[in-house]
Image (spheres, rainbow, N blue to C red):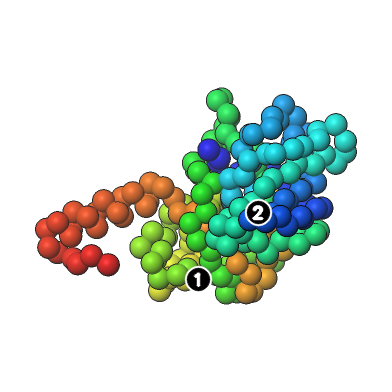
């Protein structure tokens, strides 16, 4: 489990394609790898990955993962190249502060960045989701974008706005995003469960038809 509070960005320094999977190695400050164990889970751009190897003794340190074809297809990790920056978060531990919202690290879909509006005191991003995900995104609700816990702004016809504070821009990769980019999406599990439950109740009463 994760909180959606990104701890650092990491940089892709090695990519190796193997039959059926891809090895991905990232450089990150060694302080974020302390007390790490092989087999641990780390969120990379919101995708829960399993550590296969790491080195916390060098500076910067590095950590390696194996990505299966399904992960490469479903998430934006398949578009990474050498030098790409990604969001990095270690898994939640007992006693950790929960500053965002609970995330599983299971990316459900991707959204397209439509536009970015930057002014002296504001930085906003408009995104577009596929139709099937529209019911789960609403104003003031939670959503995870590339592993970042964010609050949704205005919503209209599957398009929605995010308003980003300077601290988030400084710590994450959002400030590097451009129109046309694809970002990983994890819908808030509580919102998903409520919508699904209400839809089933309405279908059972014949008030709506199954989609």
- Point out the residue furthest to the left here: 205
Choose between 209 and 50: the one closer to the eye: 50
Which of the pair 74/193 is nearer the observer? 74
Q: Which residue is mark 1?
A: 128
The C terminus lies in quadrant? bottom left
The residue lying at 47 percent from left, 68 percent from top is 129
For label 2, the residue is 21
Q: Is residue 92 visible?
A: yes
Q: Nearer the viewer, mark 2 or mark 1?
A: 2
Give the alpha-carbon distance from disc 2 to disc 1, as whole Å: 29 Å
Residue 85 in the image: above or below residue 117: above
Mark 2: which secondary structure? strand
Quarter location, residue 95: top right
Q: Residue at x 38, y 67 (%)?
A: 132
Picture coordinates of residue 158, whole percent (x, y):
43, 70
Which image quadrant for residue 169? Answer: bottom right
The percent coordinates of residue 110 (x first, y second) are 53, 63
Secondary structure of the residue carrying tag 1 is strand
């Amino acid at each position: 489990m994760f909180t959606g509070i990104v701890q650092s960005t990491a940089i892709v320094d090695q990519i190796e394609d193997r039959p059926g999977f891809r090895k991905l190695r990232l450089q990150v400050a060694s302080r974020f790898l302390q007390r790490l164990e092989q087999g641990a889970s780390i969120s990379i751009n919101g995708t829960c990955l399993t550590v296969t190897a790491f080195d916390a003794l060098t500076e910067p340190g590095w950590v390696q993962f194996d990505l299966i074809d399904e992960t490469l297809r479903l998430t934006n990790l398949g578009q990474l190249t050498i030098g790409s920056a990604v969001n990095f978060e270690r898994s939640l531990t007992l006693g950790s502060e929960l500053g965002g919202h609970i995330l599983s690290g299971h990316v459900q879909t991707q959204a397209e960045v439509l536009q970015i509006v930057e002014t002296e005191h504001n930085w906003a991003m408009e995104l577009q989701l596929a139709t099937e995900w529209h019911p789960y995104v609403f104003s003031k609700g939670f959503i995870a974008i590339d592993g970042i816990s964010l609050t949704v702004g205005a919503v209209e016809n599957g398009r929605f706005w995010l308003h980003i504070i300077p601290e988030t821009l400084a710590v994450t990769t959002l400030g590097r995003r451009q129109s046309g980019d694809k970002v990983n999406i994890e819908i808030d599990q509580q919102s998903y469960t409520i919508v699904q439950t209400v839809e089933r109740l309405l279908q059972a009463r014949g008030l709506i038809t199954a989609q």
